Amino acid sequence: MNEFQVTIEPYPEETEKNKWLLRVTDIRQYAYCPRVVFYEYCLSGVRPLTYKMLQGLEAQHRVEELEKRRSLREYRLTEGVRHFHVALTSERLGCTALVDLVVESGEGNQRRVTPVDFKMSRREPGTHFRLQLACYGMMLEEIWQVPAPEGILYLIPLKQAVRVNLDRRLRKDAERTLAEIREMVLHERMPAPTPHRNRCVDCEFRRFCNDVW
């Protein structure tokens, strides 16, 4: 199986005037396996792009084309404006993101935004997906100044929309995860591998983890 290479910009040293930004996708990766994030920032500087990842990107593109033509009924909304590939940068959280879809609905005091994240998964969304969605919600509220009380995880293979309540606890967990990632990277401390060894089978960094085989 051929692998492609995607260059990742190295992170600068953090100072009072120059605070480097994490990616919101780091939250998902860290919750899934913290070593993936460590390797990306502290070791290789290059992340392999596998065939499985390419399949996911192609499937997401097809879903976006269909999304433009269908109603919002699946999201329990009667009307709204779709914004695709929304780029966000949060000074408060110190991170950047590119949200698959943001649905803006309501007017006046009823106005709100709903981040939608497309996933190539058939399983009940895990905590790592929900943490990422919570971070999207916080960033949208900070930048757009509009409430984001819930988000949507759209499971592409099942054509199913899973609603996620972006409550205080989930938001606090997302903020704590960001702080843990920043601490790990700044001090270059390699974390323990995920205890779920089945996740290692398709991991693009498996050749770096000689202590788990």
Image (cartoon, rainbow, N blue to C red):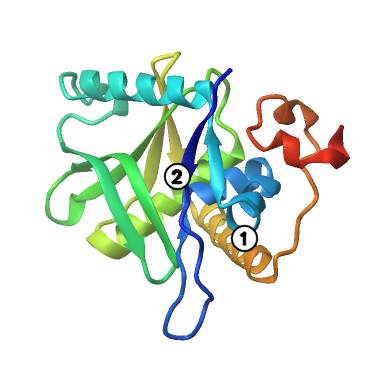
Residue 24 vs 68, above or below: the answer is below
User: Image quadrant for the N terminus?
Assistant: top right
- The x, y position of residue 168, in whole percent, is 51, 57
Q: Nearer the viewer, residue 44 or 67?
A: 44
Question: What separation in Å lies between label 2 and label 1 (alpha carbons)?
Answer: 17 Å
**Other residues around mark 2 within 10 Å, as few (<14) / some (14–19) / many (≥20):** many
Mark 2 or mark 1: which is in front? 1
Please give left or right for residue 102 compared with residue 211 in the image: left
Residue 203 vs 127, above or below: the answer is above
Secondary-structure class at tag 1:
helix
Please give left or right for residue 6 compared with residue 188 in the image: left
Please give left or right for residue 34 compared with residue 125 in the image: right
Q: Which mark is residue 181?
A: 1
- The x, y position of residue 65, in whole percent, is 22, 21
- The x, y position of residue 73, in whole percent, is 24, 23
Please give left or right for residue 90 compared with residue 205 in the image: left
Residue 30 vs 71, above or below: the answer is below
Residue 3 position by quadrant: top right
Q: Residue at x 23, y 31 (%)?
A: 77
Q: Residue at x 20, y 44 (%)?
A: 104
Q: Residue at x 36, y 58 (%)?
A: 139
Q: Residue at x 66, y 25 (%)?
A: 202
Give the residue at mark 2: 133
Residue 204 vs 123, above or below: the answer is below
Residue 141 appears in the picture as rendered:
yes
